[in-house]
Amino acid sequence: MSDFERILYETEDGRARITLNRPDKLNALSLAMQEELSEALWEADHDTGIHCVILRGAGRSFCAGYDLSDSDSPPHVSRVQNEDRKYRGHRSIDDDAWQLERAQRYRMALFDMHKPVIAQVHGHCIAGGTDLALLCDMVVTAEDAVFGFPPARDLGALPNNFWVYNCGPQWAKRLLLTGDTVTGSEAQDIGLVMKAVPGEHLETEVEQLADRLALIDPDLLSANKRIVNLAMELMGARTLQRLAAENDVRGHNTRAADGFRASVKAQGLKATLRARDAQFGDGRARVKGPETRDADGRLIDD
């Protein structure tokens, strides 16, 4: 599908490979990219020759978060959108919730589509990258990948939240209340991802899993994916996503978020992020063993 501008879409041997393709921005998620991703996911779900989807990132990382630089023009809401009309921005609490829910609908295709999706994670899987990965049915990661949600330190809450369903409430709180990160190996240890493998084995691991899924009737794959997802819905998972978007509005109205926006306006985005994260040293959590740190907040290896 050559008309996609921000992703790559290819099909082969019963699988669709969708590649986030803004490597110069570490595949930061613009609204336009999320729209293309949703379209590609539903195309794969519609195609009877496809058994599963592999979601991956081009370049050095899977996805380093949401695009906060406004460098990509947002798509129209409808084909009749007219620039002469006055539309929603972020002027009110309801406007903010509406915008967050709009973007969430694009991402929820990963959960709502019938066919299974495997996230193939390398490099950074940060902030919005975790929103994508944890909506997938299975996450296979490189051992040295980095998972975390640093914007929880000052910018807001999570607009999607499947952390508690994967790693449980205590590790979800430990990572989200600090914005600290864990490696792919540690993410496997706490159940945040299904499996971590050495980076040189990542693609083979994912492709061989897709080979096995290609042996199963797609309708049967759908039946078994959907019953597990329905079980999660009975535990409130889908309702929680709607609440997560509204809770992010609450986060956007904190003093910390006001300070973040003021700093961006005065100093720029990169300087603001550097100043915020410098206070946390290397920004890492340690899953096993004591978290002994030096004066700069960096973990000291045993």
Image: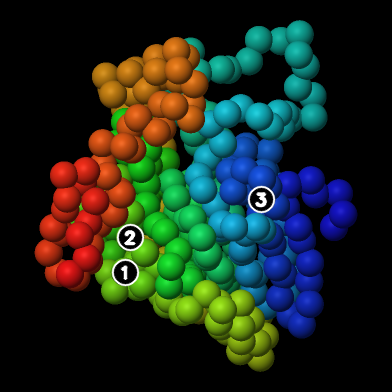
Give the residue number, with chain letter if any, for mark 3.
23
**Is 292 left, or right, of 12 in this rendering?**
left
Q: Residue 289 got which mark?
A: none
- Would you say residue 169 is visible in this rendering? no
Residue type at mark 3: give it: Pro
When asked about the image quadrant of residue 48, the answer is: bottom right
Q: Residue 182 got which mark?
A: 2
When asked about the image quadrant of residue 221, the answer is: bottom right
| Disc 2 to disc 1, C-alpha distance | 6 Å
Give the residue number, with chain letter if any, for mark 1.
186
- Near mark 2 (Cα within 10 A), the count class, few <14, some 14-19 or many ≥20, is many
**Farthest residue, direction right:** 2
Q: Are marks 2 and 3 in contact (CB under 8 Å)?
A: no
Q: Are marks 2 and 1 in contact (CB under 8 Å)?
A: yes
Assign a secondary structure to mark 1.
helix
Q: Nearer the viewer, residue 186 or 230?
A: 186
| Disc 2 to disc 3, C-alpha distance | 22 Å
Query: Residue 272 appears at what percent x and percent y?
Result: 41, 26
Query: Mark 2 or mark 3: which comes first in sequence?
Result: 3
At a point 21% along the width and 53% down the height, the residue shown is: 174
Q: Nearer the viewer, residue 29 or 186?
A: 186
At a point 59% along the width and 48% down the height, the residue shown is: 26
Assign a secondary structure to mark 3.
helix
Q: Nearer the viewer, residue 19 or 294?
A: 294
* Location of the C terminus (image quadrant): bottom left
Residue type at mark 2: give it: Val
At a point 33% along the width and 54% down the height, the residue shown is: 181
Residue 130 versus residue 253 in the image, above or below: below
